[in-house]
Image (spheres, helix red, strand yellow):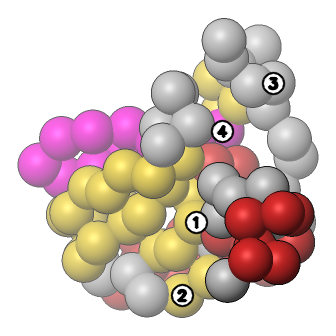
Amino acid sequence: MEISYTPVAWDYREQIEEAINKKSSGKIFYFAADQTVAELSGGIREMQDQRGKGVFIHLEPSGSIRIDRIITLFGKPAAAYDEYDAFANACLDCMGGYDKDQLDAM
């Protein structure tokens, strides 16, 4: 199931444009289509708005990522960073697979 595109703040778009202009390269962590964290390495060749799908970056040597799914761009937080942070902290209130009686017995 594909998640619909969420508009991205201009700060993040400017960060991408700066990386294109400086010809920066490195690792980009993002949410893949199956909601797992994935990574690609390279430089950003261009940012392109694809009608009905969202805004994508295209990488050198290869790969495309929708910008609202980027967690970190070359080590800097990006548009999906808050979602990732919430995802990472989601289990802080859980009981780690134990029920209350098992935890009380420990």
**Residue on which disc 4 sits:** 55
The amino acid type of the residue labelled 1 equals: Ile
The amino acid type of the residue labelled 4 equals: Val
Nearer the N terminus, badge 4 or badge 1?
4
Q: Residues within 10 Å of mark 4 (few under 14, many from 20)?
A: some
Quarter of the image with the C terminus is bottom right
Q: Nearer the viewer, residue 68 or 31?
A: 31
**Residue on which disc 1 sits:** 71
Distance from disc 4 to disc 1, alpha carbons, whole Å, reads: 15 Å
Q: Check if mark 4's residue and mark 1's residue have beta carbons within 8 Å.
A: no
Image quadrant where residue 99 sits: bottom right
Q: Nearer the viewer, mark 4 or mark 1?
A: 1
**Residue on which disc 3 sits:** 4
**Residue on which disc 2 sits:** 76
Question: Which residue range is magenta in the image?
Answer: 55-66
Q: Position of residue 57 (x, y in %)?
A: 47, 47
- The structure residue drawn at horizontal position 82% and vertical position 78%, both measured from the top left corner, is 104
